Amino acid sequence: MEQQAKKVERIRIYDVALAAGVSVATASKALNDTGRMTAETRERVKRAAVELGFRPNAMARGLQGKRSFTIGLLTNDTYGRFTLPLMAGISEALVDHGVSVFLCTIEDDPVLAKIHVDAMLDKQVDGIIASGKRIDRRLPVDLSHLPVPVVYAFTDGPDDSVRFVSDDAQGSREAVQWMAGLGRKRIVHVTGPASFASVKERADAYAGVVGADAEILHGKWSEAWGHDAVAQLWAGSGPHPDGIFCGNDQIARGVVDALRERGVDVPRDVSVVGFDNWEIVAAATRPPLTSVDMNLKTLGKEAGLTVLAMAEGKTVEPGIRKLPCQLVVRQSCGGAEAG
Amino acid sequence: MEQQAKKVERIRIYDVALAAGVSVATASKALNDTGRMTAETRERVKRAAVELGFRPNAMARGLQGKRSFTIGLLTNDTYGRFTLPLMAGISEALVDHGVSVFLCTIEDDPVLAKIHVDAMLDKQVDGIIASGKRIDRRLPVDLSHLPVPVVYAFTDGPDDSVRFVSDDAQGSREAVQWMAGLGRKRIVHVTGPASFASVKERADAYAGVVGADAEILHGKWSEAWGHDAVAQLWAGSGPHPDGIFCGNDQIARGVVDALRERGVDVPRDVSVVGFDNWEIVAAATRPPLTSVDMNLKTLGKEAGLTVLAMAEGKTVEPGIRKLPCQLVVRQSCGGAEAG
DNA sequence: CGAAAATGAGAAAACGTTTGCGCATTTGAG
DNA sequence: CTCAAATGCGCAAACGTTTTCTCATTTTCG
């Protein structure tokens, strides 16, 4: 026996109209709650549709000039670290509206990007969400003169565009204040390369809280750098930090591991906070990391609803929308309720 | 200035026909390399299309009864660990054919699954790829009587379905043989819960290579379990293993960390191999893990091409297709070319 | 040179919806 | 009662392609 598409006849609105004893036009209007007709007629058509299991053909509907109930998500985040939570939020927000999402991963390849954007446009997407892995970099394609609305989520875009990003400054402040609230007096910041905008934003926020005592160490986004940073910090003879705010979870994990290897107890002697709340890293660290979550799912939800609103013709003010981060408390800081 | 969709007039085939001085019918045939006409005419039409930047409206084309150049990827792997590489492969294989992919994440929720499947069918997808995070579990939705072809990738499916999985047995054998080839005599296997089919397959393959000396420890899929397993293994007074084949990379990382903490040198004293080749874990381990890669991208590519072939009416034999795994050598075993 | 075959190209139908408009019929007001 | 307004519903066009059929013209062959 072979595997092949079975030709199941799909129910068309024509069949529904026939069953309900009305014209196709009336059936359409009944189902869409438009037009004029008796409540009884409308009801009868709807019942027939349900009974027959009618599902409108999205192609025909889309062709007719209205929406396609489809949007495109473009990203250069091949690994999906940032895009997947975003996607989850977008999808969750839009499934209620009957909208499906094309996911296109372009790996910083302008040619591939153009191909995918063109394919999306061919398919008449109602809008496009551009996304990435860095807030200060753009996708390798110009989306500014497309016939459909575009919003940018977790990636940079033109000045007159609609952009969604996380409020890293607020998240950072909460993280540092949390440690301060736990009695930490000497908090340092170990973070990524200074060339990243988010590094600067987080570092500035950190410095804003700790004031003149600020000490910022830049390195790679890796566990190894976390290790090295601890080595540096503990090399001097001066007082050691009692709180370390890290630029991401990988650095934080490196820091925690290095501290343990040195016999420094986390969180008793030193509090550590990460950034990203990357479950796989944060939860596997010993002890599990307290970390700043960027609420990417919520960000995706907002971006999805916004692009949809734009597709429906509503005007949206351009500009940057910062959505709050949230401190997720685990055990690397103390202060955990259970722990 | 406000952000809104600019109404850019899209070029229709009508415009191309006009520009080339032919009828719409001829234009269509020219562009699709069908029908009869002078080479010169065909060329003229094509040139006009390029000059005007004509892109066919996929909705109109799809409505016309042919393919929609769209497929759906359904997964319950919310985290994307397995689905994203798969997706990358699918996308890479199908972009050349002008096919776009709807990604739908359903979290073991049958209702959500049905909604997404229905949405896909409404949008006339040419086929569906079902995918998951476990090879021995099915998605919470019945895909067996759909009007479009379905293939299963990295998830279980009905007996008469087309399924793609990785050849874990072969991968496991290669891993164990690699350690044996490096002179390891006492290789144990630390893996996940016995209830997983992939655990059994990997364990059986391991046992097949090491023979009567097989020692298999089951636990969770976590770093913590890797730690505990080492504790167990080093607790006895008998000879310690000199090779540890782990059921996944997280366990392997736990094992390597525990060994280091115990002063056992990896890879000098003990070789460790992981499974999954999850970059983020494998590369961050000290030393980086040699690990079995399931080639999910290739798997996705195959699945994509297959579902496409089925959509084009080609018949495909049902059954399980096992694709080979590949040992990725890093430093946790010795034997790395660059050290 | 004449008839059959091959060739080049266009007209029109079809795909499944939505929607503007028109036409009866009913309702309401004076 | 009469006439205007409101109501209920259907006709047909439209969306942008592809495809079948037809027809005129050219080529081929005996």
Image (tube, coloured by chain):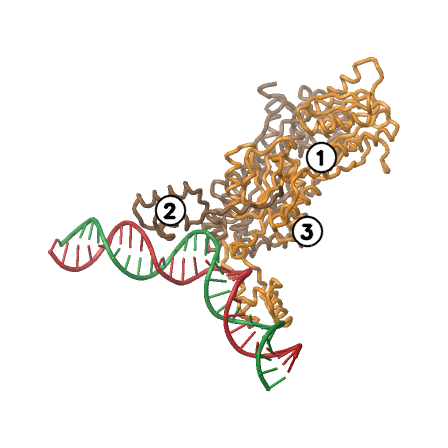
Chain colours: A orange, B brown, C red, D green
Marks 2 and 1 close (CB-CB < 8 Å): no
Q: Where is residue A105 in the image (x, y as percent from the top left)?
A: 57, 38
Give the numbered dot on residue B109. Answer: 3
Q: Position of residue C18 (x, y in %)?
A: 55, 60
Q: Mark 2 lies on which chain?
A: B
Give left or right: position of A134 versus B50. Answer: right
Residue A193 position (above or below residue A63): above
Circle 2 sits on which residue?
A: B19
In the rendered image, the quadrant that contains the C terminus of chain A is top right
Label 2: how many residues lie within 10 Å, few (<14), some (14-19) or many (20+)? some
Q: How far apart are marks 2 and 1 (CA)?
A: 58 Å
Chain-order first, disc 3 or disc 2: 2
User: Viewer-proximal residue, A86 or B230?
Assistant: A86
Badge 2 marks a residue whose secondary structure is helix
* Marker count (numbered): 3
Q: Position of residue B160 (x, y in %)?
A: 54, 52
Closest to the camera, between mark 2 and mark 1, is 2
At 69% from the left and 20% from the top, the residue drawn is B269
Give left or right: position of A254 versus B133. Answer: right
